[in-house]
Image: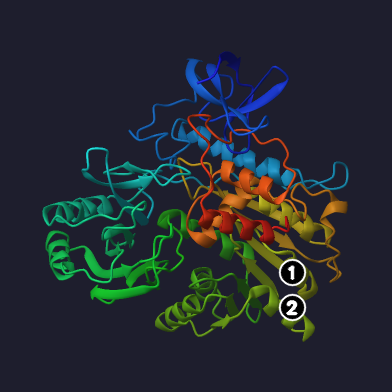
Amino acid sequence: MGKKYTVRCKSLDREGRGLVSFNNSTFAVPYLLEDEKAEISLVYGRGRDNTGAELVTVLEPSADRVEPACPHFKECGGCNWMHMSYEKQLREKERIVRENLESIFVKGKAKCPAISPIIAMDTPLHYRNKVHSTFARDKKGKIVTGLYRENTHKVVPIKQCLLEQEAPARIMQTIRKFVEDRKIKVYDERTETGLMRHVLFRVAANGDVMVVPVIAETMFREKNLLVSTITKAHPEVKTIVLNYNLKRTTMVLGIREEVLFGTGVLEDTMNEIAFRLSPRSFYQVNYAQTKKLYEKVVEFADLKPGETVLDAYCGIGTITAFLAKAAPQAKVLGVELNEDAVKDANINAKRNNLENAHFVNQDAGQYITALAAEKEHVDVLVMDPPRSGSSEAFLKATVTLKPRRIVYVSCEPDTLARDLKVLCKSGYRLEKVQPVDMFPQTSKVETVVLLSGEKVDGHIDIDLDSEKLEKKAGTATYAEIKDYIKEKYGFSVTSLYIGQIKDKVGIKDRKNYNTGSGKGGVPTCPKEKEEAIMDAFKHFGLV
């Protein structure tokens, strides 16, 4: 730990970290709240510009500070806002959305519309319906299960995460005892030996559970005994799917699956619509808030009889189904690149008698480009892209297609603002903004916006440099690179590793704080993560 300083926090950054200034430098301090007086210390990473700061002691706490309910707070990093009162969390998320969107409007020319109060969660704990637990051994050799410490592959032993629904923890206790009693070896990433790697859970709204044990070998002699042990103790378990992940990888699931019990899918119901979920299906993790979010999408879309709506990035067709049910006289079209997701979407539509819902297995950008070339008409476009936002090609195709209304669902305010600036420049007008708290106790926030396109001319020249967008072509923030890798590869990378690879390929970096802890030696980026970082660089046009 470096030299200690006494500071006063004046404001928070867009990730909720306390900003402090001294010695002509500004530092973002995790877990520090505005107006608090605190003692901090500097930590030194790799290079002159990689100096960060960490909180040592709060000397004068804010009225918004609360005692975190989780005993593992700060260890795994999953509930990084649990030190804030829930009311403060909601205010900060509204601020983050507002500041990002206001940044795209030129003063005196246009004004950001009023942002609706964030839709809060009634009970902001135990909401995650998808749970992942990892096997490991502690220093004494005892088998433990839990979550990865943030930006590492060190397992924090956790028996009950307060963000996760409670059933998986009870079932995991049974599985862990089974592994211990049968003396089954757990997987060791360093030696690449052992059988049990992870367990994935999905929980339906009615309490039904899917269990997916992940193993690292081709043979599991005790699998039938494990099934009988789980189902006898936990009748809520309706299906068990064994996943084989034999590769040296940080991704949780392998390719091969074997259904050991039940149908291999979990049935969930939302808004009286039944959805079929496989272990790999993308499905929002917060049931209660997802329903509110999708209802807002339907409200913003405001479909009329005879209108056509295109749901881009539709996945298994959850939003598509909500739209099709709400407007049975409209034509609803979902477009998705993942073939398995499209199969599930078609099954879901058929089971729910949604005859006006149709699905296409194609890249959304290419599909709407083809529609525009054929002079086809779409009244409403609904887009729910990944955290990295939409692509330049998709935005160009959208403007060419000229839908009258666009409903954009975003889980990242930075990329939402970037994409909205492009669409507004082309003639779209931002009409409504609705934040939704999908991830309480964290810095993440979901937003749904409505744009109208009465003045769209069908042409746009996306020159991000000349427009001086915050996110320019050929640049990407560390957070965007991390999110891209997390979504595509399923593992995390640190800022230190990104900086190492930037140095290696000759990318000039600007100052980046809070990268590296300065404790011990500097770790070298593993080959697998280097390849993922290089892929992200190519995706964002850095190389």
Above or below, comparing residue 284 to residue 34 in the picture? below
Q: Position of residue 538 (x, y in %)?
A: 68, 60
Q: Which residue is denoted by mark 2 in the rendering?
A: 369
What's the residue type where badge 1 is placed? Ala
Front in this rendered view, residue 298 or 439: 439
Front in this rendered view, residue 226 or 370: 226
Question: Which quadrant of the figure contains the C terminus?
Answer: bottom right
Please give the name of the residue rendered at 73% of the width and 82% of the height, measured from the top-left corner.
370
Front in this rendered view, residue 312 or 47: 47
Q: Pointer 1 and pointer 2: residues touching (CB < 8 Å)?
A: yes
Q: Position of residue 249 (x, y in %)?
A: 43, 60
Instruction: Report which quarter residue 540 is drawn in.
Output: bottom right
Please give the name of the residue rendered at 88% of the width and 52% of the height, measured from the top-left corner.
466
Q: Position of residue 227 (x, y in %)?
A: 17, 67
What's the residue type where badge 2 is placed? Thr
Task: Looking at the image, tell me whether mark 1 or mark 2 is earlier in sequence order.
Answer: 2
**Residue 538 located left or right of residue 532:** right
Q: Position of residue 307 (x, y in %)?
A: 66, 78
Front in this rendered view, residue 453 or 228: 228
Disc 1 crowd rating (10 Å Cα; few below 14, some 14-19, many 20+) is few
Label 1, secondary structure: give it: helix
Asked whether the viewer can see residue 388, the reply is no
Please give the name of the residue rendered at 34% of the width and 57% of the height, measured from the top-left corner.
192
Asked whether the viewer can see residue 533, the reply is yes
Please give the name of the residue rendered at 69% of the width and 73% of the height, measured from the top-left corner.
365
**Residue 207 located left or right of residue 282:** left
Q: How many marks?
A: 2
What is the distance, in whole Å, between disc 1 and disc 2 at their CAs? 9 Å
**Residue 397 located left or right of residue 91:** right
Above or below, comparing residue 530 to residue 361 in the picture? above
Choose mark 1 or mark 2, whichever is in front. Answer: 1
Q: Which residue is denoted by mark 1 in the rendering?
A: 393
